[in-house]
Image (spheres, rainbow, N blue to C red):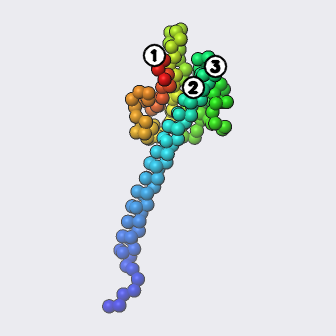
Amino acid sequence: MNRRGWTFIELLTVMIIIGILASIAVLKYIDLTRTAYAAKVAGEFTVVRLAAYNYEADHNNQWPAEVGPGITPPELVPYLPSGFSFTNSSYTLDWDNFTSGGNAAYLLGVTCSSSDARLINALVQNLGSKAPYFVVNGTLTYILIDPNGNY
């Protein structure tokens, strides 16, 4: 018997194997994208921290006022890279500035919130969930200054 070509079963088997490998590759790509976003957020935490410290040094121990989620504090704009934004398609940053009980003690932080729970999980895996990072209700907060004034 002189046979040329492939049987239908052989072709079907190869297509199923290729389909399984492609689906694994797509899932890995999605995970890598989230990991990249988590690294980007970690870098943005550092950028905001350095901008806040520079602002505080230039303004006699004063800190920028809180303005709400997704809004870059106007006081920090000169200290941030050009085009830096607190709003992104996958997450939102929020500058948190709390004064405790009328004292001079501050609690400063930057909060990242996202509707993508897996992005927050990737952040937790990347940064951790112990001080200075805290996870509450699907948001991750990076504490810049604790109530005792520690940087």
Residue 2, how many percent across, how many down? 35, 90
- Circle nearer the N terminus (1, 3): 3
Answer left or right for 17 relative to 62: left
| Residue 67 rendering spot, x and y as whole percentages | 61, 23
When asked about the image quadrant of residue 60, the answer is top right
Q: Quadrant of the N terminus?
A: bottom left
Q: Secondary structure at mark 3?
A: loop
Q: Is residue 136 visible?
A: no
Residue 56 is at least partly visible in this image? yes
- Image point 49% across, 48% down: which residue? 33
Please give the residue where the numbered disc 3 appears in the rendered image: 59
Relative placement, left or right, of 91 versus 134 is: right
Q: Which residue reaches farthest bottom?
A: 1
Q: Is residue 11 above or below residue 41?
A: below
What whole-number distance in Å separates the C-alpha atoms at marks 2 and 1?
Answer: 16 Å
Query: Is label 2 in contact with label 3 (beta carbons under 8 Å)?
Result: no
The label number, if any, that marks residue 37 in the structure image: none
Residue for badge 2: 53
Q: Residue at x 38, y 76 (%)?
A: 8
Residue type highlighted by circle 3 = His
- Earlier sequence position, callout 2 versus callout 3: 2
Q: Dot 2 lies on which element?
A: helix
Residue at image point 63% right, 33% down: 80
Crowding around mark 1 (Cα neighbors within 10 Å: few <14, some 14 to 19, many 20+) is few
* Circle 2: residue type: Tyr
Amino acid under label 1?
Asn
Q: Position of residue 72 (x, y in %)?
A: 62, 29
For this orientation, the residue located farthest to the top is: 102
Give the residue number, with chain letter if any, for mark 1: 148
